[in-house]
């Protein structure tokens, strides 16, 4: 059984020393470091943080031959069965839910960035040992042995184990008898136990949200036998990453102190917690098993993330922690964001899923005009699917529960064809409609489906002429951040990074000075600098576009629509 030892003895150096011990299994042994972390679809080349690789077999150095940027081969001829020790260091300076960070305050490790995969040992049990400062604790979502080490049933479970270490507070609660732990690293400056002081009901609210997830799945208990929440509480930030038996969250303290921000935090909790069913166990076939070393096209990410993003807004409501007006406000903001994303008319939902590796996680200043998030459009299609199924006496939760029974609980990976068949079994016309929604660049009939539940989208027009660009003020001047495709700024020849110098001969110094005084069709002279060269152009704004959309109730909605809304908001089938 391979043993992985992590030495955090010098956290100020930001280096963790990794030692992997086992008996030499064969004359040649290939080592590879994973390139990405499941749940975050981007090749991250973790090997860039690895240094000082050395191997001893018995007490003698072992020759190492590099096969690629993140792969090596050991020559162990004549030494099979002897003790083998692989040793290296990993630099832990990147703070995110999918990387590693170590300093005097805490340590966090995504083990895909830390542990080498040993050829032939993927299905072997692994023992994990951690050496850390004496006043720290290790919070690990693995069963712990009497000797203080942890045991993973294989390489996959080991890599699915996020590690948080530090002198942190740990709270406990249970969900349907299943033990849960909550650990917070208060990475922002301030008093300790800030969370307990400012959010005294948080643990009870998280418990209620978790119970709402179980009800949604019609499950008597969580899918995990024990669950660990890790929260990085920072000055600002937002994000999360799911695991089989845990999740890692990042959130800003200022946001937690507003009602809307606290509600969004509970939605984040619901999202990552629900993933223990959808994504982690109810998993696309393309990720069964996971290839840690290359990108794999997953056409059903719209289901994995979009469905979850739609449901996470409802779960605090069904837990009694938010209200109907609040849900409509949050849902309306997502619909507005979707309708104001030009890229939805360029990239289809299926393309968004297939191109996740090269687009969503590499978004730049031009992304909004060329792509749409499968989280966002996936949630919009989930809304449409839910309301369409209700026309047929079913609901989205019915399909998810059936997929869980047929695939998730048995660990069987599903193909996108399995999803289409499951939806068509509840509403036959979805055999035609759903593929169209996945491939089409147009919008589904949002107005019609929302009218079923007595709702409507109301546009809010802009107050000023549209220039087709966004800017930021820096010490050097006004810099162009985004130029909208086919917009006035693009037609004027502006590009991202241009510095705006003067308008109609007047020096520009502040944003307000540039934005004021425009009327549609007016042509004004603009002086700007690009790559050190001064240029002149003329900018002619367009009429104000829709600035936002608001989801409102229809006063004339009849009793049937109101009843459908009640059932829909409760996530109950029709």
Image: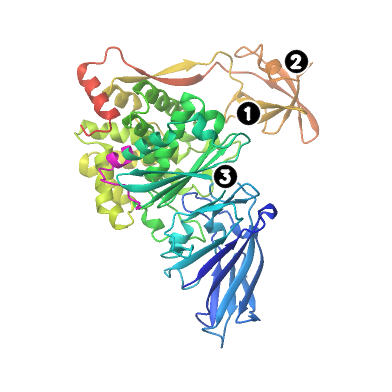
Residue 298, percent from left and from top: 42, 52
Residue furthest to the bottom: 78
Residue 221, percent from left and from top: 29, 47
Range of residues picked out in magenta = 212-225
Between 326 and 303, the one lying in front of the other is 326
Q: Look at the image and say whether residue 213 sits in the magenta stretch.
A: yes
Mark 2 and mark 1 in contact (Cβ < 8 Å)?
Answer: no
How far is the residue under mark 3 from the one under mark 1? 22 Å
Position of residue 446 relative to residue 295, above or below, is above
Between 491 and 442, the one lying in front of the other is 442
Q: Is residue 297 left or right of residue 523?
A: left
Q: Which residue is mark 2?
A: 504
In front: label 3 or label 2: 3
Between 401 and 444, the one lying in front of the other is 401
Callout 2 secondary element: loop
Q: Quadrant of residue 264?
A: top left
Callout 1 secondary element: helix
Q: What is the number of callouts on the image? A: 3
Residue at (41% x, 24% y) in the render: 332
* Mark 1 or mark 2: whose residue is earlier in sequence: 1
How far is the residue under mark 1 from the one under mark 2? 19 Å
Q: Which color scheme does this rendered protein use?
A: rainbow
Q: Quadrant of residue 310?
A: top left
Overall secondary structure of the magenta section? loop
Q: Which residue is mark 1?
A: 490
In front: label 3 or label 1: 3
* Mark 3 or mark 1: whose residue is earlier in sequence: 3
Q: Which residue is mark 3?
A: 362
């Amino acid at each position: 059984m391979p043993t992985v030892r992590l030495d955090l003895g010098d956290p100020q150096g930001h280096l963790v020393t990794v030692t992997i011990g086992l008996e030499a299994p064969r004359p040649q042994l290939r080592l590879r470091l994973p390139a990405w972390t499941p749940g975050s679809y981007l090749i991250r080349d973790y090997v860039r943080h690895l240094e000082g690789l050395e191997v001893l077999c018995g007490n003698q150095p072992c020759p190492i031959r590099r096969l690629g940027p993140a792969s090596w081969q050991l020559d162990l001829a004549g030494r099979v069965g002897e003790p083998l020790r692989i040793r290296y260091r990993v630099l832990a300076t990147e703070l995110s839910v999918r990387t590693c960070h170590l300093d005097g305050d805490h340590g966090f490790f995504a083990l895909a960035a830390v542990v080498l995969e040993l050829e032939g040992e993927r299905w072997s049990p692994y023992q994990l040992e951690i050496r850390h400062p004496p006043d720290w604790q290790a919070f690990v979502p693995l069963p712990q042995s009497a000797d203080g080490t942890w045991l993973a049933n294989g390489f996959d479970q080991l890599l699915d184990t996020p590690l948080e270490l530090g002198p942190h507070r740990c709270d406990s609660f249970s969900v349907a008898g299943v033990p849960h732990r909550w650990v917070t690293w208060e990475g922002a400056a301030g008093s300790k136990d800030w969370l307990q002081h400012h959010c005294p009901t948080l643990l009870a609210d998280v418990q209620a949200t978790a119970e709402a997830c179980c009800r949604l799945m019609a499950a008597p208990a969580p899918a995990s036998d024990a669950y660990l929440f890790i929260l990085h509480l920072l000055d600002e930030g937002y994000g999360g990453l799911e695991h089989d038996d845990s999740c890692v969250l990042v959130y800003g303290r200022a946001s937690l102190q507003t009602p809307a921000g606290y509600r969004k935090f509970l939605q984040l909790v619901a999202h990552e917690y629900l993933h223990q069913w959808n994504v982690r166990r109810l998993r696309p076939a393309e990720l069964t098993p996971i290839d840690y070393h290359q990108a794999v096209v997953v056409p059903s990410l719209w289901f994995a993330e979009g469905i979850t993003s739609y449901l996470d807004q409802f779960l605090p409501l069904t837990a009694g922690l938010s209200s109907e007006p609040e849900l409509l406000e949050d849902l309306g903001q997502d619909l507005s964001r979707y309708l104001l994303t030009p890229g939805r008319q360029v990239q289809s939902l299926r393309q968004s899923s297939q191109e996740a590796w090269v687009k969503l996680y590499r978004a730049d200043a031009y992304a909004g005009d060329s792509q749409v998030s499968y989280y966002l459009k996936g949630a919009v299609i989930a809304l449409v699917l839910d309301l369409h199924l209700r026309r047929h006496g079913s609901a989205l939760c019915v399909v998810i529960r059936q997929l869980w029974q047929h695939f998730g609980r048995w660990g069987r990976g599903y193909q996108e064809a399995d999803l289409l068949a499951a939806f068509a079994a509840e509403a036959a016309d979805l055999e035609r409609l759903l593929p169209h929604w996945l491939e089409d660049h147009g919008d589904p009939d949002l107005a019609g489906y929302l009218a079923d539940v007595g709702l409507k989208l109301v546009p809010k027009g802009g107050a000023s002429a549209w220039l087709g660009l966004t800017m930021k003020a820096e010490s050097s001047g006004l810099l162009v951040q985004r130029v909208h495709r086919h917009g006035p700024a693009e037609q004027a020849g502006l590009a991202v990074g241009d510095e705006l110098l003067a308008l109609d001969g007047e020096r520009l110094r502040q944003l307000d000075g540039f934005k004021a005084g425009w009327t549609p069709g007016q042509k004004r002279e603009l002086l700007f600098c690009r790559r050190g060269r001064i240029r002149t152009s003329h900018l002619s704004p367009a009429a104000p576009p829709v600035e936002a959309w608001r989801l409102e109730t229809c006063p004339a909605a009849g009793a049937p629509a109101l009843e459908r809304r009640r059932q829909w908001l409760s996530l109950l089938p029709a």
